[in-house]
Image: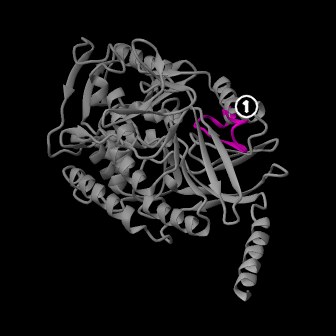
């Protein structure tokens, strides 16, 4: 009889405990990265590094198992590693996918730089990835129609959906469904990509999700002004995790928080979120966390990164013997971000063209490089090594000394100025545009004069400026540097210039 009484009391206790379950309140955590191109630490090893990020990720998972890891676009390109060849093929983001697979990313958004890859290269990266992707406004163009992107494994296709749903349960049994919407800025037109209107698609995605989940968040890769417009269109989004700008920011439009971390994992955003199912109130505590050398590297991810870095070092040593040597320190950020570098003269563009002149002992009239050759899409600050220079100019190439007629030089300069916003925009040394007139060495350009100008070899191939090639009759002479000259590679020239 006593046994049955004890059993009854135990059942009553369990029943009473069950009544206290599901308090309708739940906590979860988001770890946000955006615009990450480098898997290893940057700036002399001081900042960034995906192995350090994984340490933070694991700590957050121990704190709360309901933690998600996000990438808000731009990670497959540009990177120095992505430009090298392994087994005859350029890496093109393979290293990043391998690292992100090991980190178990929960969701990633397309960024505009994902479409730097060819259709086949992007498909390979999709197939290799073990993490889910999301986008509402980018589609794959086929001969028949625009379709959802997909992963293909063992002959089976798995679509990249327009929205994403995740379910969380906490210790007391409270369950919640959270949804995500995503759009990408249509700034990288490609024949195989169709961009839908990001505002229409964002609102349509939200409408499709709102009755299926408790709460919806944004994971976007657009300009901040676009994010703000989305926030106005969808005022019930508690948080938009965004990318594209490369500089950390935290803005509010009404009750919508818009957060962006620094590029290359110099910082990450940690969002600790509480949701009350009864009141439908969301509370967010956000922390911008600096990723620096004080953070221990996760062993698993560190090994993958080290393997890729050893491959990279071998390639760089073919050009520069000491790739990790600190050659320069700058407190003023050297601007190599895509938009400025393709639109206006930046201090980094001036530095590169000055180095091109230096390669010929400054015994030339001017130097010119196209903005599209500068691929870092980031700023350089602090300690700089040759690896950083290779990140800036991954394709290298010789610096050519060209005798060119003033009339053709003016035509080239005019073309470059009109090409602002594209890779054909020209950075210049000893050349200035004053109002509508070009000046070489502080003197107005003379159409019949022969000038000696240092050009990147790419420019003389006629890809960016169709009429600029060795076949043009006004290109009178081209000097190709010898193997023992620093002009043999623009990166060698820049390293030597910075050492001076």
Residue at the right extreme of this rendering: 279
Residue at the bottom extreme of this rendering: 2
| Residue at x 66%, y 46% (from the top left corner) | 178
- Residue 389 horizontal side relative to residue 223, left or right: left
Q: How far from the left and from the top, in percent, is residue 314?
A: 21, 54
| Residue at x 72%, y 44% (from the top left corner) | 215
Q: Is residue 224 magenta?
A: yes
| Label 1: few (<14), some (14–19) or many (≥20) C-alpha neighbours in 10 Å | some
- Residue 35 horizontal side relative to residue 499, left or right: right
The answer to which of 161 and 138 lies nearer the viewer is: 161
Q: How far from the left and from the top, in percent, is residue 286?
A: 69, 57
Q: How far from the left and from the top, in percent, is residue 401?
A: 25, 31
Callout 1: helix, strand or loop? helix
Corner quadrant of residue 9: bottom right
The answer to which of 407 and 332 lies nearer the viewer is: 332
Please indicate, yes or no, whether residue 500 appears anywhere in the rendered image.
Answer: no
**Tell me, what colour scheme is on the image?**
one colour
Q: Which residues are magenta?
A: 209-226
**What residue is pinned by disc 1?**
229
Corner quadrant of residue 123: top left
Compared to 342, does 24 lie above or below?
A: below
| Residue at x 34%, y 49% (from the top left corner) | 95
Q: Is residue 318 magenta?
A: no
The answer to which of 177 and 46 lies nearer the viewer is: 177
The answer to which of 407 and 426 lies nearer the viewer is: 426
Please indicate, yes or no, whether residue 245 appears anywhere in the rendered image.
Answer: yes
């Amino acid at each position: 009889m006593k046994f049955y009484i004890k059993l009854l009391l135990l059942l009553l206790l369990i029943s009473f405990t069950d009544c206290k379950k599901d308090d309708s309140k739940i906590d979860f955590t988001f770890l946000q990265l955006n615009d990450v191109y480098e898997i290893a630490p940057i700036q002399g090893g001081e900042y960034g590094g995906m192995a350090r990020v994984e340490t933070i990720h694991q700590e957050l998972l121990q704190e709360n198992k309901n933690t998600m890891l996000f990438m808000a676009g731009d990670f497959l390109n540009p990177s120095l590693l992505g430009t090298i060849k392994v087994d005859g093929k350029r890496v093109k983001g393979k290293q990043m996918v391998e690292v992100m697979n090991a980190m178990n990313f929960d969701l990633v958004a397309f960024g505009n730089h994902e479409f730097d890859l060819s259709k086949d290269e992007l498909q390979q990266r999709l197939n290799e990835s073990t993490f889910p992707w999301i986008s509402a406004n980018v589609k794959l163009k086929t001969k028949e129609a625009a379709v959802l992107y997909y992963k293909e494994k063992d002959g089976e296709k798995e679509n990249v959906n327009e929205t994403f749903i995740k379910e969380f349960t906490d210790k007391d049994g409270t369950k919640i469904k959270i949804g995500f919407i995503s759009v990408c800025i249509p700034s990288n037109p490609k024949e195989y990509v169709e961009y839908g209107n990001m505002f229409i698609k964002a609102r349509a995605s939200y409408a499709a999700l709102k009755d299926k989940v408790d709460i919806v968040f944004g994971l976007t890769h657009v300009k901040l002004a676009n994010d703000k417009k989305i926030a106005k269109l969808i005022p019930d989004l508690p948080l938009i995790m965004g990318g594209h700008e490369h500089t950390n920011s935290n803005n509010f439009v009404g009750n919508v928080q818009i957060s962006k971390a620094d590029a290359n994992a110099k910082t990450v955003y940690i969002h600790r979120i509480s949701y009350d199912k009864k009141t439908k109130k969301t509370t967010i505590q956000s922390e911008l966390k600096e990723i620096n050398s004080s953070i221990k590297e996760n062993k698993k991810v560190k090994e993958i990164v080290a393997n890729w870095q050893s491959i990279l070092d071998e390639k760089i040593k073919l050009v520069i013997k000491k790739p990790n040597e600190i050659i320069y320190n700058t407190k003023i950020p050297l601007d190599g971000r895509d938009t400025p570098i393709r639109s206006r003269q930046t201090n980094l563009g001036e530095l590169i063209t000055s180095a091109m002149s230096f390669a010929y002992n400054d015994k030339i009239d001017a130097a010119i490089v196209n903005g599209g050759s500068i691929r870092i899409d980031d700023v350089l600050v602090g300690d700089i090594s040759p690896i950083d220079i290779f990140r800036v100019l991954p394709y290298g190439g010789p610096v050519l000394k060209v005798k060119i007629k003033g009339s053709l030089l003016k035509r080239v300069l005019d073309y470059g100025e009109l090409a602002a916003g594209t890779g054909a925009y020209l950075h210049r040394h000893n050349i200035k545009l004053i109002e509508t007139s070009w000046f070489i060495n502080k003197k107005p350009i003379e159409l019949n004069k022969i000038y000696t100008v240092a050009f990147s070899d790419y420019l003389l191939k006629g890809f960016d400026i169709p009429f600029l090639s060795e076949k043009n009759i006004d290109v009178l002479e081209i000097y190709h540097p010898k193997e023992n000259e620093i002009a043999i590679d623009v990166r060698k020239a820049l390293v030597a210039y910075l050492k001076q």
